[in-house]
Image (cartoon, helix red, strand yellow):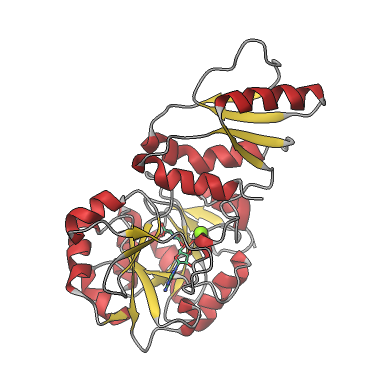
Amino acid sequence: MTALITKDLQLALSHLRNGDIVAFPTETVYGLGADAKNPLAIQKVFLAKDRPADHPLIVHIASVDQLSAWAKDIPPIAYSLAQNFWPGPLTMILRKQAEVSPLITGGQDTVGIRIPNHPLTLELLAQFGSGLVGPSANKYGRVSPTSAQHVADDLNNEVAAILDGGACSIGIESTIISLVDDKAVIMRQGDITAQQLAVVLGYTPAVNKSQDNIIRSSGSHESHYAPLTPVYLLSKDELISACKEYTAQQQKVSVLSFSDKPSDLAIDLYWQTIQRDPKSYAHNLYANLRAHDQLHNSAILIEQVAHDLEWAAITDRLVRASFK
Ligand code: TXA
Ligand code: MG
């Protein structure tokens, strides 16, 4: 089966109603969509991704009216967050309704939910009339897709269709916030920062950095978002010396840096200079990692980014991409 890249919403809907998988665009990354009420369809998603069964999926819905169909004991703050950030790159972890399949939640009593901000997918969800599970449309542990072609590169044989909504505007996955305890906790950093959330919450939420937390979150495993080529995060000086060492050993590397290539380095080195702007960095991050990976060099050397809030979600992805 060869997946069809299409803009045909009705075709996508008919596949989804049939229990098949359709990749869909969002403002963050492409999702691997399946009917969240159909256990066989959900199982197909785990198989397509090679994802362990105990890693929960998030449910995508079209409107906040549908929230109570999936979650219960919803705290008022969830509605305030929804009002401020939905549709948008925020996933809320809430207590699940009894009917929500344990396949979705990895057997936990909580469920992750979001309304994505992409016109095509909002229309798809509205017409579908129910929830769609939607993990990022990549193989487990690998780089997330930010274009229809990225999905085709990874999962061409596993999906019935790929709904083409162009390049994802944000480019990294949603911020995940858990609302199941008294205080909200950020489970995964994303475009919406702790500071933005603090304005609505009235306090700055903690960022969960625990490696062995009991709430399983596949994004929280250290090696993740990873190309097959080893990635190293280095200071600019370390990066230049590493280039010289690899070249001396007749090995090829590629570089992602904020400054231009020094003139004394090998000319056939693939050196990409990028802007020091977190929004455009995030927007291009996964496409860049994929392009560098396709060179099949000995290593991808990436210049470290700033240690500030604006770069926190990017740092998180880079650290996981480079984890050995
Ligand atoms: O931006 C996004 O969130 C994208 C787009 C497609 O919406 N989706 C996405 O899904 O990144 P995925 O499955 O790749 O990442 C969702 C994360 C996983 O790390 C999962 O383990 C975690 O959310 N998660 C889902 N339900 C959870 C729950 N009940 N408790 C804790 N973590 C949960
Ligand atoms: Mg993912």
Question: Is 47 left, or right, of 174 in this rendering?
Answer: right
Q: Residue at x 37, y 88 (%)?
A: 99
Q: Which residue occupies the extreme right position in the image?
A: 249
Above or below 71: residue 10: above
Q: Residue at x 65, y 30 (%)?
A: 254
Q: Residue at x 67, y 23 (%)?
A: 241
Horizontal and vertical percent position of residue 270 = 65, 25
- Quarter assignment of residue 202: bottom left
Above or below 170: residue 46: below
Q: Is residue 158 visible?
A: yes
Q: Which residue occupies the extreme bottom position in the image?
A: 98
Q: Residue at x 75, y 25 (%)?
A: 245
Count numbered badges in the picture. Answer: 0
Horizontal and vertical percent position of residue 279 = 37, 38
Q: Is residue 171 visible?
A: no
Quadrant, the N terminus? bottom right
Q: Nearer the viewer, residue 172 or 6?
A: 172
Above or below 96: residue 26: above
Q: Nearer the viewer, residue 73 or 16?
A: 73
Horizontal and vertical percent position of residue 16 = 45, 71
Horizontal and vertical percent position of residue 52 = 60, 72
